[in-house]
Amino acid sequence: MYLDYFGLKEAPFRITPNTEYWYAGGQRGEMLAALLYAIGQGEGIVKVVGEVGSGKTMLCRKLAAQLPDSVDSVYLGNPTLPPDDMLAAILADLGVDTPESGRQARLAQLNTTLLARHTAGRRVVVFVEEAQGIALDNLEFLRLLTNLETATDKLLQIVLFGQPEFDALLADPRIRQLKDRITLSLNLSPLTESEVAAYLRARLAVAGYRGPDLFAPALIARMTRLSRGLSRRINVLADKTLLAAYAGQTHTLTPAHLEAAAGDAEMQPFQRQPATRRLRLAWLSAGLAAALGLLAFVAWQAPSPSASLPSPPPSQTARPSATPAPPDVVDLARQTRRWLVTAAPDTHVIQLASAKEAAQAAVLLNSLSAATPQPVRVLHGLSRGAPAWMILAGEFPDRETAMAALRTLAAPPGSTPFLRTVGKMRTVVLPTG
């Protein structure tokens, strides 16, 4: 990996939101201050809209970390939860382990819990991500939750994070009452070219880099166009560009490195050049990835006569196929999130293992045996209060069937498989894109 090569203590461009890498430029710092002020006032509903990959989840986590000690936060990462499950998830986050049966009973239970917090001088704010995916009826239910109040104060405040489609959803006259309750609307705009440069420098500095600027102005200009100023795309491009330079054993990042990175990330049509000027990315073996604890390593076919790797024969125009491509953990997590919407709540699965990073989850997936119950899924959610990538196996209609499969299962090294249900998993799922 390129960490030691560039003098880094850790990977600077992971796409998993980590508040240590918070970037206050691009008006993010001002938005954070505005959100903290709005929550401090305790009135109305707050809305934050931004494109996919613009940094909404990072802003949400930074906001939760910056809240005063007197404010308790509840996180709803799954917008498809029906109202009863939504109430159960909120109650669980507030420490109520056993929700009442029925919506009215749960509403009364929530009101009692909120009143107790209010009496103790505490307030509660609910963060809702992926708001563009919430059904109109559920949005209206969220609005009704803000009716829980004392004679002078609201007991619950809601902050909605969504993609631009959420604004179109709010234009529906059937939820005009909710729209009227929104007292603060913020828009996460893409980063400009100068902000992209500052963003790259800031993340590299946090990761321990102390050398001269790695990304030249020309590279930053091109990266801004390719990424459209979206932080997640910037992270992907920057990471792959560093991998490319490392594989070529150079500390000088070139436009060719960036273009090959963009082609590998499918951010533009990759125009193949003549064989003597061709750069190509290929995954190395899964064993190397496992040893390094990382998902991928980029191998380069250098364009100059001094390259250590020979050029492929002219007839070989396809990407090398000797090594299987690593699994797309993020895509598997998205598929799991969609499956959770329709699966029966009492459906059981076996959780085989979990990892803090998607790269580590990919290594775990590659290590599964052929006897692993199918289908194999990845759940991106909260595990013991922290984000994790969890490997799930099988799909069983009841606990007895799942237990029978669990007894015959060989546990992966260092892990203890256990059963989970769809109903419980719905309350901890996190967005992946």
Image (cartoon, rainbow, N blue to C red):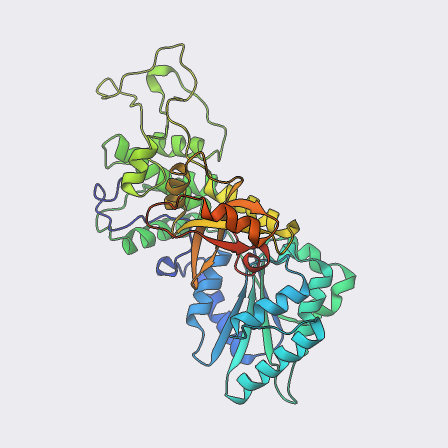
Q: Determine whether, in the image, residue 273 is placed left or right of residue 41.
A: left
In the image, taking residue 277 as reference, residue 26 lies left or right, namely: right
Residue 169: quarter of image: bottom right
Q: Is residue 244 left or right of residue 173?
A: left
At a point 61% along the width and 47% down the height, the residue shown is: 339
- The quarter of the rendered structure image containing the N terminus is top left
Frontmost residue, 305 versus 337: 337
With respect to residue 424, does 35 lie above or below?
below
Q: Residue 181: x percent and y percent?
A: 68, 72
At 21% across and 48% down in the image, what residue appears? Answer: 211
Residue 318: image location, x then y, percent: 43, 18
Above or below 299: residue 17: below
Q: Is residue 211 something that shows in the picture?
A: yes
Q: Nearer the viewer, residue 222 or 346?
A: 346
Residue 195 location, x and y as percent? 41, 52
Whether residue 220 can be seen here: no
Q: Quadrant of residue 90?
A: bottom right
Question: Percent x, y for residue 263?
Answer: 44, 31
